[in-house]
Amino acid sequence: MDIDGFWELVERSARETGTRSARLEWLEDQLCGLSAEEIVDYEVWFTVCASRACSWDMYAVYWTITGFGSSDGFEYFVSWLISRGRDAFEKVADCPDRILELPDVQRLFEWMKNFVHRRTTWSSDGRFRLKRVTRVRREVWPREENPEFESFAYVTFGSYVQVTGLEVDSLREAVRARGVDSKFPFLTFHAQPDGEKWDFDDEAEFVRRLPQLARQYGLTR
């Protein structure tokens, strides 16, 4: 399976189902019809894509939108991004600030309008101060639209075990044997997101790196 085949499965799973649980079942059924080698192919491409999106700027996007800073949550956010399909992923992977161009994210902001505390205050000299949101009414998001999709990252596990009779660790070993290592979970294995680590509370740096997101939150006039 090449990268085109991977994205075709990801996108068909969305087109042919209506819920996340149904989507996972559909994908697992499709993968069970493939060879063990092809299942490894799928997992390799998923890992490559997830690692490509593992950057400090993307982490800042996740941190800002959700109001949380969990490394596990960031991994689930990247899985969700992959689940949106190739066009969405390619738009955002190398330029996280374009996240606002995704219709899914635009809907999230509509739902959040009346539930999220304002993130900025303005001082007397006209400069803003970025305040991290520590509590978000996440129930405002329909469960199917939550920008985290943990289970999407595990869809190969059951099919691989069923097709091969081996343990999931064998799948991970097969991926590493292809020369592919995951950046998740970062920090746990001393892996680091790409790019320069920066302080998300640094208002000037936030505006410089993520200007569209800064405007969305009123950080620039």
Image (tube, rainbow, N blue to C red):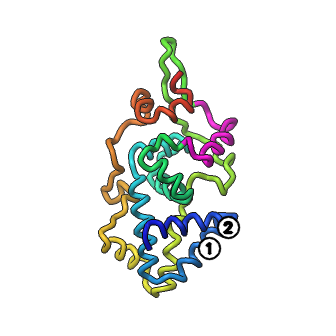
For badge 2, the amino acid type reads: Thr
Counting the numbered discs, the total is 2
Instruction: Tell me the element at label 1.
Output: helix
| Residue at figure coordinates x 48%, y 12% from the top left | 125
Q: Which residues are magenta?
A: 100-118
According to the picture, the residue beneath numbered tag 1 turns out to be 26
The span from disc 1 to disc 2 (Cα, nearest Å) is 8 Å
- Relative to 11, say whether 173 is above or below: below
Is residue 112 in the magenta section? yes
Give x and y (percent) for residue 95.
44, 44
Front-most of residues 193 and 137:
193
Which residue is at the front of the view, 112 or 14?
A: 14
Split into 4 quadrants, where in the image is the N terminus? bottom left
Residue located beneath label 2 in the image = 17
| Residue at left offset 45%, top offset 42% | 60
Query: Dot 2: what SS?
Result: loop
Q: Position of residue 117 (x, y in %)?
A: 61, 33
Give the residue at the far bottom of this rendering: 165
**178 shown above or below 73:** below
Contact, mark 1 vs mark 2 (Cβ under 8 Å): yes
For badge 1, the amino acid type reads Trp
Q: Work out whether mark 1 precedes mark 2 in sequence or the reverse, and give the earlier one.
A: 2
